[in-house]
Amino acid sequence: MTATSEPAPAPLPRHVAVIMDGNGRWAKQRARPRTLGHRAGARAVNLCIDFCIDRGIEALTLFAFSSENWQRPADEVSALMSLFLRALNRELDELHRRGVRLRFVGDRSSFSPELRNRMATAEALTRTNIGLQLSIAASYGGRWDITQAARRLAEQVRAGSLEPADIDEQLLGRLVSLAELPPPDLFIRTGGDQRISNFLLWQLAYTELYFTEKLWPDLDRATLDAALESFASRERRFGLTGEQLRKAHA
Ligand code: FPP
């Protein structure tokens, strides 16, 4: 009898992290205000979530608003805040029904009490959901994240519960955002720029990077499939040699 072996399924990222760039240019191409681009961007967020659920991706992290975005014109910031609140009010029940767990990462202190309350409610409501682990990075910066983790370690040292010599990567890694999730396997940035822009600096250490010219509001399933296909073709060595990896998997 001849043994038939099925081709191994293409490796799928467990965690995808996305910089959703290009809303402003999308609006400009149409001679419309930037805020219209953000509204169209919110529709692309839904498409991306649906795609990840359909494909069985465990975790999706979206960069919605950076620490630096507070410096944008006041009317754009305020339109984005209203958009976040409306999107949360509109989508929360449906996300919960689909088993999505929502987390928000970033410095919430500058958000309005209303938005902070809605974030806390959404997190509490979906806390035990085991479907897509959806994280929204808002008022987030990778440097802020590492700094807040370092500050918490310093507080433990001051309290006498930690020796500086015991601080290692694992300990600090447990205090950065999203520590409870596997680190992102795949990073996608739309809009054509090829940079990380202070996103998950610690967490992206060994993430595969994928850049596309597509503007975020134009996102479609074909673009996301192309990113997954590119990911499946990469050899992830994590600092080892290709030879070592092949031996480990033999
Ligand atoms: C970057 O494009 C996008 C943002 C700063 C905002 C992202 C917000 C959304 C996609 C809207 C909805 C989000 C949620 C989570 C409901 P840009 O404005 O920098 O575009 P540009 O580079 O073309 O100017």
Image (cartoon, rainbow, N blue to C red):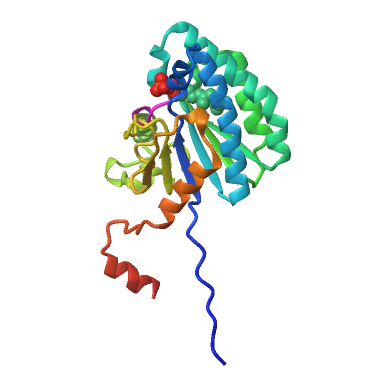
Q: Give left or right: position of 134 versus 24.
A: right
Tell me the residue at 72%/34% (across/down): 94
Task: Examine the residues drawn in magenta and state their main secondary structure.
Answer: helix
Is residue 5 positioned above or below 150 on the image?
below
Q: Residue 210: where, in percent of width, then height? A: 38, 43
Is residue 75 positioned above or below 44 on the image?
above
Q: Is residue 8 magenta?
A: no
Tell me the residue at 59%/36% (across/down): 47
Q: Which residues are magenta?
A: 140-144
Q: Residue 158: where, in percent of width, then height? A: 34, 31
Q: How many marks?
A: 0
* Quarter of the figure with residue 155: top left
Q: Give left or right: position of 129 versus 67.
A: right
Residue 139 visible in the picture: no
Tell me the residue at 66%/27% (across/down): 121
Tell me the residue at 43%/25% (across/down): 22
Is residue 16 positioned above or below 193 on the image?
below
Quadrant placement of the C terminus: bottom left
Quadrant placement of the N terminus: bottom right
Residue 126 visible in the picture: yes
Q: Residue 226: where, in percent of width, then height? A: 46, 47
In front of the other: 58 or 214? 214
Q: Residue 122: where, in percent of width, then height? A: 65, 29
